[in-house]
Amino acid sequence: MIVTGVGKGGDRVPGKGFSGPKFPVPDLQVPDALETDLGNEVDGEVRFDTGSRALYATDASNYRQVPVGVVLPKTTAAVIKTIEICHRHGVPIVSRGGGTGLCGQTCNTAVVIDHSKYLNNILEINFDAKTARVQPGTILDHLRDRAEEGHLTFGPDPATHDHNTLGGMIGNNSCGIHSIMAGKTVDNILELDVVTYDGIRMRVGQTSEEELNRLIAGGGRVGGIYKGLRELRDQYAELIRERYPQIPRRISGFNLDQLLPENGFNVAGALVGTESTCVTVLEAKVRLVHSPPARSLLLLGYPDVFTAGDHVPEILAFGPVGLEGLDDLLIAFAKKKGLHPENLTLLPEGNGWLLAEFGGESKQEADDKARRAMDAISRFSQPPSMKLFTDEQEEKKIWQIRESGLGATANVPGMPLSWPGWEDAAVAPAQIGAYLRDFKALLDAHGLIASLYGHFGDGCIHCRISFDLFSHDGVRNFMAFIDKAADLVVKYGGSFSAEHGDGQSKAVFLDRMYGPELMEAFRRFKSLWDPDWKMNPGKVVLPYIPDQNLRLGVEYNPWQPETHFHFPDDEGSFSRATLRCVGVGSCRRTHDTFMCPSFLVTREEKHTTRGRAHALFEMFRRDFLKDGWRSGEVREALDLCLSCKACKVDCPVNVDMATYRAEFLSHYYHHRLRPMPAYSMGLIGLWSRLGSFMPRLANFMLHAPVLANISKMLAGIAPERTLPKYSTETFTEWYHRYHKPIESGSRVLLYTDTFNDCFFPETLKAAHEVLIHYGYEVEILPQRPPAARPPLDYGMITYAKKQMMRIIDALSATVRQGIPVIILEPSTAALFREELPELAPQHLDGQRLTRLTFLLSEFMERERLDPPKLSGRVIFQPHCHQKAVLDVNAGRSVLTKMGLIVEEPQKCCCGMAGSFGFEKDKFQLSMKIGELALLPAVRAAGEDSYVVADGFSCRTQILGGTGRQAMHTAELLAYALRGGH
């Protein structure tokens, strides 16, 4: 197998650093035996298939390199064996954790070792010694949550703290909001257990002169490494002291300063930040620091972000544990995207802000520190506007604004796309104001736009910049800009990177920071550990230059097929929509998250929104995944997508994988037979017309012992599932028999969806009772409308759209009169509010239906109807579409106004997801998702607690998993109106 090593670059910008590729790699000859040997000898998962390689071809950076293969080792021994085999065959390797690298350091033409799935354990926490031992795949927040049990924490906390791994933090020397309190990752690593490419395993840390001499005297490979390190220290010590920037966030380059006597010849510290170019980390012993249990947040508003930067030193004097900065452009972008609109109103007056967080042993102590700072600041000659937040929920909302920086600045409507590339430079905190002014002038000179925010207390500036990475001139401008940006940072004595590392995006400029002598020291340092230069080649030392291996670039020319959906927010292009994913990996969170439910169980990259988006991106490139709509790799990646739409709201850039999945499946199965559930469940509307006409016969066929098993087998339904029974009388039939008009009441139409009309008519009867109580004249359609949601979710878009047009025709007279359409099934309401405008954007009656569609709770909130009172607790499981694209707060508000204590044990999908959980090959996954929190909480709830779920599928999952029948909000309201009967 031959794997191409070097991506093509654009034209070189004349001048220093761009004379040509720094690390030209020939086409890599990969022995066919490599995959076989890995598969036979490694205790783990070995994947050389095109689908897996496509998933790991990029990270959160501008770069793309298709890997040789991917290994997910299950044990530390398996990591060592993987490296041994790669060394035997002469194939490069690169380690990967959360895959959130912004500089291209976690993608390479190499074997990718993914530590995150299995090697993610906290091995030990010693609260007395304030230390912990962790595996490299451990998620930071998992460690921090455990450490908080002893009022301790791991100090560095990047914005990705809820899904990034400690191994990645060690590789990049990560920092975060609270590094002014606890320092960089390098300041918090005590020991590392590492292995070299040639198989030498070492435990390294601070080394006394006596120990150093002993190790050197021992000879061999270990002795040679330590001898070389000592020579580097002795030869370059004075130059290191002279040339290393003396700023809080000097991350660029290697930490050779850690070898100096004043740092205890700390070999572990020297290896932190080497970005998988020297060794593979097997285990780390980390330092934990005291975590002030109470926090207070002080916001300071300035005329602009530059003035805010000028005042950073003055604010640091008051001892905050965190000091962040924001500009007005970030706030403007957040408003355009509708991100946290209620939070933005909390900001004090200004166009640039500092967020100063104070810590204390009690809330009073933290508040007092903040108030003392306010008193002193108010006496400044030109004091900023100020606002102290002492309410924990309000503080959380402000931090959401800051932590949404990437989401707010990516894919902004009406703005060009923005990218990393110069996203985390740092200067001395005292120089931030001046640096920002010069940096903004440089942006303007190149016609670029960027919001400026970041860790101002440490001098770190974050930004995503509107580089044009599609055109020849755009790439030249990108290269010219970063060339000058590098000179600007050097002018200020700063660092190109403040926490994201160098990778290949900035490494080419390191000689400007350090000079040729120290660059030679870096090369010698790497060679000591990796004499074969097979560890993440082309990154940091002898790097690719920044326009090589671009994901986009001048040769990017994606396939542009015709689609059913119009993708109005993505220039009408499905391929453009796949660029929404910026790789930050929020979909890899493992707790307290809405997305991705399948990943929460499988921990597979292909079951994340990011993984699926990357597979689709590769499909549209057509140079690696070449089968277009027939791509089996893409179909496999999308197979366990529940179409819950969580990513539509929970992803910081609003990737809508449910829509992408439906679009893909519609083409993949064009002129092909679909799996049986697509016909049995996707066409439930057709079968329910028959079933509701002959309910007793249908129920006999679906529930008689032998016939039920045969029916489920033929339909592709899990034998463990109990199918709902058809009601002997539909709500439509009941209504025509019993409804008595209210001539004076305002008119509403109660929508008789298939699920509630045929299977649970009690919900519609309850809604009818509630609306009658409030004086409304309740109308329904003469006949039950067709079901359009199920076929849409199976990708039967043409058929689903026809059903939607039939529905609109049936409702046209209603919506033209402005009569509200009240829908009990959230997935149906979401269909009219979300998919209808994208499939038929010009249909006027469709637009009217979209505006007039309401859930019952939404309608009650709009009409300001006071709900009946009821005491007690309620477990509330909102439907996914209710949370993603409807107004879930209306549902919570109605329950709260009733007087109930509302509990939501599970943020993500219940696991049923329409018919997903009915399918035979998805039943086990469905139940595991339900068991994350929802089903145990329902089982633990007392009989005096209520269980409410408005989604038909949610109620079915709860019933099947606990034996308890959940209520619809309408049923609970009717129950309360009857005085609890």
Image (tube, rainbow, N blue to C red):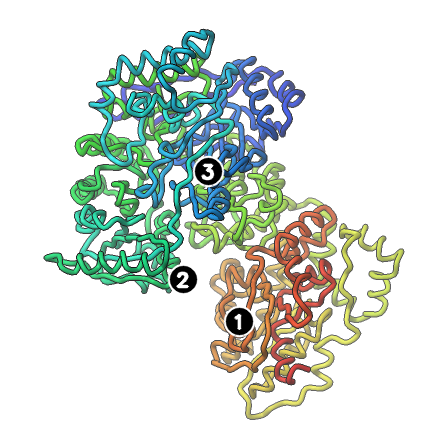
Q: Is residue 698 left or right of residue 834?
A: right
Who comes first in sequence, dot 2 or dot 3?
A: 2
835 to the left or right of 232: right
Label 2 or label 3, whichever lies nearer to me, is 2
Q: Which mark is residue 393?
A: 2
Which residue lies under the disc numbered 1? 853
Give SS at disc 1. strand
* Real-space Cα separation, disc 1 to disc 2, in angstroms: 32 Å
Quarter of the figure with the C terminus: bottom right
Question: In the figure, 178 relative to 196: above or below?
Answer: below
Name the N-terminal-most of marks 1 and 3.
3
Q: Residue at x 54, y 65 (%)?
A: 832
Residue 57 place in picture, x, y as percent = 49, 32
Hey, what amino acid is under mark 2? Answer: Gln
Rounded to the nearest whole Å, what is the CA distance between mark 1 and mark 3?
37 Å
Q: Position of residue 59 (x, y in %)?
A: 45, 35
Task: Give percent across and percent down for residue 183.
Answer: 33, 38
Any part of residue 339 in sight: no
Q: Earlier in the sequence, mark 1 or mark 2?
A: 2
Looking at the picture, does residue 43 appear above or below residue 870? above
Compared with 210, 325 (above or below) is below
Between 531 and 755, the one lying in front of the other is 531
